[in-house]
Amino acid sequence: MGGPYRYKIRFSGIVVEFILPTPIQPPDNMELLRCDSPVPAQDTYTLRLLERPLRPRKLMVSSHGEARIFHTSKGWLHIYPALGDGNGCQVACLFCPNGKHTIYYPASRWEEYSEVWRFAHLICGERLLLRHNAFLLHSSLVRLHGKAVLFCGASGAGKSTQASLWQEHLGAEILNGDRTVIQRRKDGFWGSGSPWSGTSGIYSPEEAPIAGIFLVEKAPENRVEKLGFPAFSTLLSQTIVNSWDPEFMDAVTGLIADVMDTVPIYRLYCRPCKEAVLLVHDTLFGKENAP
């Protein structure tokens, strides 16, 4: 079969390498984040081909969406039965604290998978990010004046619309349409694009320090309200979490609390119009800085 074939991506300053049995045709979200520099990877995912089913010796701790989750002596094992070969061999990811992770595919289907390979929902991305003091927030991310502005909300709240309006009226860059990486660094919190973007299809390796986060709600009139502690529950509800893992929850809630201590959080009641764009811009940057 040949190999191994190595492929690196980079986002939010995190370099991730995939070690595969054969070359693949990367999907768009991987290709746009591709990293060809010799910088070493901080996390690796080695793909193993299964000839027989995985049989965890530990009891299952949770069933979350498509995944069955086990806490093993090596790390967290996520098994995806629906993506198996029909004969018991599963697709799975073993996420390990040391950054050396394993992805499993049925050997009988690797040729098929390698042509249409998708990885974002298989690599335990929320755990990967938490290893690097980061979390994934359901939000659109734009960059203007060298700063990141996030529009957060559930599907249909209007966050993608606001990002598009910023691009149209202010010339802002949209770095991600649906999932923003928020990362704590020495100089504060930064927002960056990610391999996850929902249905927007907007991926970018670009990043910027966060100027403000806006929790979007549709309303007949445009209005901005500065928020304090009440924003915590909304931010947590829009964060990808592992609710079955107390250590994970302690760490991610600590990060969110730190965000609230250092980044301005607002409620944005708005219509899909230029006036809403200017209101948010002037709230963060002042009228004198309008493009």
Image (cartoon, helix red, strand yellow):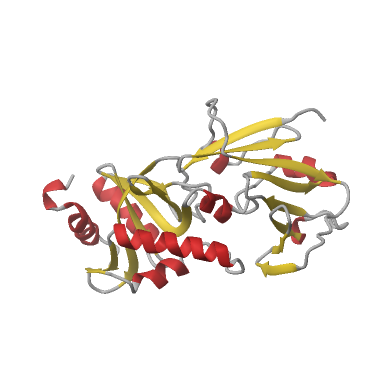
Looking at the picture, tell me which residue is in the foreground, 106 or 59: 59
Whole-percent x and y of residue 111?
A: 79, 40
Residue 289 appears in the rendering: yes
Residue 230 in the image: above or below residue 7: below
Looking at the picture, tell me which residue is in the foreground, 285 or 72: 72
Image quadrant for the N terminus? top right
The part of the image, by quadrant, that contains residue 127 is: bottom right
Residue 69 in the image: above or below residue 22: below
The part of the image, by quadrant, that contains residue 2 is: top right
Residue at the farthest left position:
288
Residue 123 in the image: above or below residue 217: above
Image quadrant for the C terminus? top left
Residue 17 in the image: above or below residue 179: above
How many marks do you count on the picture? Answer: 0
Whole-percent x and y of residue 177?
A: 43, 53
> Which residue is found at the position 53% from the left and 28% from the top?
39
Residue 239 appears in the rendering: no
Whole-percent x and y of residue 215?
A: 34, 66
Q: Does residue 112 appear left or right of residue 136 in this picture?
A: right
Q: Does residue 264 appear left or right of residue 74 in this picture?
A: left
Looking at the picture, tell me which residue is in the foreground, 62 or 87: 62
> Which residue is found at the position 65% from the left and 47% from the top?
118
> Which residue is found at the position 24% from the left and 43% from the top?
145
